[in-house]
Image (tube, rainbow, N blue to C red):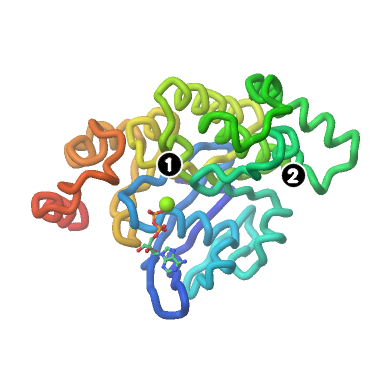
């Protein structure tokens, strides 16, 4: 990839509580205006990677202990989550955490707390333009709308911050196929129309490779492969272990001997 990157992760190491080494030299590049997918099994270190970028790691007693992260050419790995957010990065954490007792609209508005009143109104209209379903549900209590609508609410809230880079952590998790389709269409739209660069973490590899032109595969705190989605879709190992299943987190065979042998082949 040439150097039109909006984000560069340079060989980072991440530790929790000063002793638990989770990322062991991870490098990822996100070209400006593109969607990049980060795939891998449960516990691989995907969420940790996103938190290293957004600075949320610091709130879990985690730290980038080696390497660096650059956003638009500036080093951000020593900055606070607040500073990183102000610079234009937003993370949508896994599990679609809405403020359950607030309405959908109040939830969305939380993302616009730095805006003037008029600005807030325009931004809100823009969110409703992409998520007409949220406009219909705007006065409902967020804790009672469907999982898909909660996911849309947190993406809408993130959109209110006018991000340049969106970090999405498993947006499809636990949602019905039709809703997943709807949400991914909107994500693609946000990328194309708002020119938001996206790092998409997914367990659903098939889905991720269909929206992201480039992907990284992470295992056990390391990137074991990265390539265009076209090439990855045709790679036999990827076909066997990542495609054909929608939720390999629950699949025991993932860690079997056969897999281990294959992994060694990837690494060699
Ligand atoms: N706050 C934390 N403290 C200690 N270990 C953690 C913490 N968060 C995650 N881990 C560990 O880091 C590893 C990677 O976790 P995570 O980044 O959540 O993986 P993924 O998102 O790929 O499922 C796991 O072994 C997990 O137990
Ligand atoms: Mg995770």
Residue 41 in view in this figure:
yes
Quadrant of picture, ligand 1: bottom left
Picture coordinates of residue 128, whole percent (x, y) = 71, 24
Residue position for label 1: 37
Q: Nearer the viewer, residue 172 or 150?
A: 150
- Which label lies toward us, 2 or 1? 2
Q: Which quarter of the image is occupied by the C terminus?
A: bottom left
Mark 1 secondary-structure assignment = strand
Q: Nearer the viewer, residue 89 or 19?
A: 19
**Disc 2 from disc 1: Cα separation:** 27 Å
Percent x, y for residue 6? Answer: 59, 48
Position of 63 compared to 79: left or right? left
Residue nearest the viewer, comparing 47 with 9: 47
**Disc assigned to residue 110:** 2
Residue that appears at 37% across and 33% down = 209
Q: From this viewpoint, is residue 191 visible?
A: no
Q: Is residue 252 left or right of residue 203?
A: left
């Amino acid at each position: 990839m040439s150097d039109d990157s909006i984000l560069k992760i340079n060989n980072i190491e991440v530790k929790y509580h000063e002793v638990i080494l989770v990322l062991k030299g991870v490098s990822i590049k996100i070209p400006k205006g593109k969607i990049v997918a980060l795939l891998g099994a449960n516990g691989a270190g995907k969420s940790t990677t996103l938190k290293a970028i957004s600075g949320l790691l610091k709130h879990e007693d985690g730290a980038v202990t080696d390497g660096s992260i650059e956003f638009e050419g500036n080093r951000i790995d020593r900055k606070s989550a607040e500073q990183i957010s102000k610079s234009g990065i937003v993370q949508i954490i896994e599990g679609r955490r809405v403020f359950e007792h607030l309405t959908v609209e109040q939830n969305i508005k939380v993302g616009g707390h730095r805006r003037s009143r008029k600005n807030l109104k325009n931004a809100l209209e823009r969110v409703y333009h992409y998520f007409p379903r949220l406009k219909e549900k705007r006065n409902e209590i967020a804790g009672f709308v469907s999982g898909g609508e909660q996911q849309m609410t947190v993406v809408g809230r993130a959109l209110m911050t006018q991000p340049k880079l969106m970090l999405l952590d498993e947006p499809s998790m636990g949602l019905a196929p039709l809703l997943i389709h709807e949400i991914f269409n909107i994500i693609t739209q946000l990328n194309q129309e708002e020119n938001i660069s996206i790092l998409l973490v997914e367990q659903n590899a098939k889905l991720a490779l269909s929206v992201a032109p480039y992907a990284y595969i992470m295992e056990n705190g390391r990137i074991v492969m990265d390539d265009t989605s076209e090439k990855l879709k045709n790679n036999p190992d990827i076909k066997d272990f990542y495609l054909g299943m929608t939720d390999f987190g629950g699949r025991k065979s993932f860690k079997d001997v056969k897999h281990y042998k294959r992994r060694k082949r990837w690494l060699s």
